[in-house]
Amino acid sequence: MANKQISENLRDTIKQAERYTLLALSSAVVFAALSLPNPGAGDVVNWKLLGVPLPVAPQLALVVLYFVYVGSCLLAENMLIHVRDLADRLEDREEVRAILSCPTILTVSPIGRLFGTVLPAALVVFGLIKVHLQGVYELPSWAWWVGYGFAFSGALVYLRVRRFVVPNLYAERERNET
């Protein structure tokens, strides 16, 4: 009975990590797209919040999107830590492999993992460089370095998947290579 509950929790945790990863990907794409024109030019971004039009300055939109990206990457990282803990509680390694083979952006293929984790980090770094060079924000250099550092949160998710999910998912391949 306990193993059944743990396996259900493992499935749900993987799905939640995928949701956070997709949220990070979508916010990174919008962040990079919004940074392409000069955000300091004074245009207004029209967002709809629950059907209500909400005019937002591009500078504020970039800040919100950046923090959504970083927050969702950190939450995905947290979910992957829980995936490892739940998988360690299950005694049946075949069941763990079967659950980890559930088709998500983190477990489908190496290209899917790169697309879902490293590409958003690259897009956010690209957007930050563009915004930095345009002089939109008057920030000290240490603040920019902290911003660039947190932009690599997606790469941390990739490393977590690479260190835990891939060896458990493809355990037979690793045994055959050694």
Image (cartoon, rainbow, N blue to C red):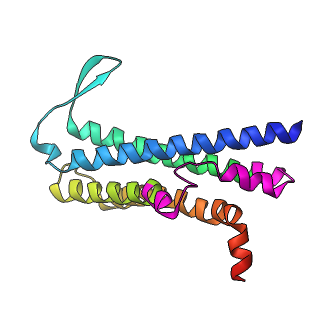
Q: Kindly identify the residue that appears in the image at 26 percent across and 60 percent down.
A: 129
Answer whether residue 4 is magenta in the image: no
Could you tell me residue 72's position as x and y percent?
49, 43
In the figure, 63 relative to 95: above or below? Answer: above
Main SS of residues in magenta: helix
Answer whether residue 105 is magenta in the image: yes
**Which quarter of the figure has residue 68?**
top left
Q: Kindly identify the residue that appears in the image at 35 percent across and 38 percent down.
A: 64
Count of picture labels: 0
Quarter holding the C terminus is bottom right
Q: Tell me if 157 is positioned left or right of 13 in this view.
A: left
Write down the region rendered in magenta. Answer: 86-115
Could you tell me residue 159's position as x and y percent?
56, 64
Could you tell me residue 2's position as x and y percent?
88, 38
**Which quarter of the figure has residue 145?**
bottom left
**Which quarter of the figure has residue 1?**
top right
Q: Residue furthest left?
A: 41
Q: Kindly identify the residue that appears in the image at 68 percent across and 42 percent down.
A: 11
In the figure, 55 relative to 58: above or below? Answer: above
Could you tell me residue 27's position as x and y percent?
37, 43
In the figure, 112 relative to 177: above or below? Answer: above
Q: Residue furthest right?
A: 1
Which of the two residues, 151 or 113, is positioned nearer the viewer here? 113
In the figure, 45 relative to 126: above or below? Answer: above
